[in-house]
């Protein structure tokens, strides 16, 4: 069974050769406007492998033949860019909040460790005080017993 021209084959592994996830993108260049492709997340200039693969068949009609379509597609692309920019900003905000919460967690863990050490010290001091009191009581009992014994004799 043959696949039709309009079907899309996106059976592509999720990872690029550089072990970064490939992302599905849409071309915004005038010659390939709206044409979808997979590309490496890391640009070749930044050490990526520059993985690239079209997943849509190339449109047979050029959008340049229909300026109103081109204009409409450009508006949609710009809307997509704005949405993408907003999402990127939200991601940055969430990452910043995560970092702040991680710092607070680290501070709280350090305070907890200090409190546990203080509690351990207080428990040791309390045990020492009990031992001293027990020694004193024992000493007094011995003195009283000796005194009672000599009074009896």
Image: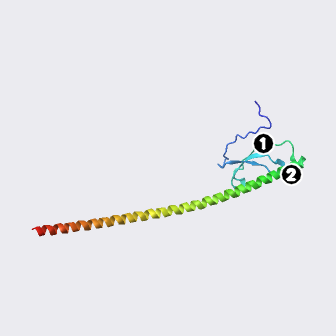
Residue 69, placed above or below residue 101: above
Instruction: Residue 3 in the image: state x and y as whole percent.
Output: 77, 34
Q: Nearer the viewer, residue 68 or 43?
A: 68
Quadrant location, the N terminus: top right
Q: In the image, what residue occupies the spot 56% across and 62% down?
A: 104
Helix, strand or loop status at disc 1: loop
Instruction: Residue 25 in the image: state x and y as whole percent.
Output: 74, 48
The image's mark for residue 128 is none
- Residue 8 is drawn in which quadrant? top right
Q: Earlier in the sequence, mark 1 or mark 2?
A: 1
For disc 2, the marked residue is 71
Instruction: Residue 49 in the image: state x and y as whole percent.
Output: 70, 50
Tag 1 near tag 2, CB within 8 Å:
no
Q: Nearer the viewer, residue 70 or 25?
A: 70
Frontmost of labels 1 and 2 is 2
Q: In the image, what residue occupies the spot 27% across and 65% down?
A: 134
Asked if residue 5 lies left or right of residue 125, the reply is right
Q: How is the image coloured?
A: rainbow
Q: Nearer the viewer, residue 105 or 49?
A: 105
* Residues at marks 1 and 2, CA–CA distance in whole angstroms: 21 Å
Quadrant location, the C terminus: bottom left
Q: In the image, what residue occupies the spot 21% across and 66% down?
A: 141
Residue 69, placed above or below residue 135: above
Instruction: Residue 119 in the image: state x and y as whole percent.
Output: 42, 63
The image's mark for residue 56 is 1
Mark 1 neighbour class, 10 Å CA radius: few under 14, some 14 to 19, many 20 or more: some
């Amino acid at each position: 069974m043959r696949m039709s021209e309009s079907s899309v084959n996106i059976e592509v592994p999720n990872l690029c050769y550089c072990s970064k996830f490939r992302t599905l993108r849409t071309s915004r260049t005038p010659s390939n406007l709206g044409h979808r492709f997979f590309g490496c997340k890391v640009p070749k200039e930044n050490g990526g492998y520059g993985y690239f693969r079209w997943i849509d068949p190339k449109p047979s009609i050029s959008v340049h033949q229909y300026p109103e379509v081109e204009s409409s597609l450009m508006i949609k692309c710009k809307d997509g860019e704005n949405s993408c920019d907003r999402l990127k900003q939200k991601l940055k905000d969430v990452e910043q909040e995560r970092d702040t919460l991680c710092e607070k967690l680290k501070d709280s863990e350090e305070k907890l460790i200090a409190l546990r050490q203080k509690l351990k010290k207080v428990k040791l001091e309390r045990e020492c005080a009990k031992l001293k009191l027990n020694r004193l009581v024992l000493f007094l009992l011995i003195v009283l017993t000796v005194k009672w014994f000599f009074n009896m004799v």
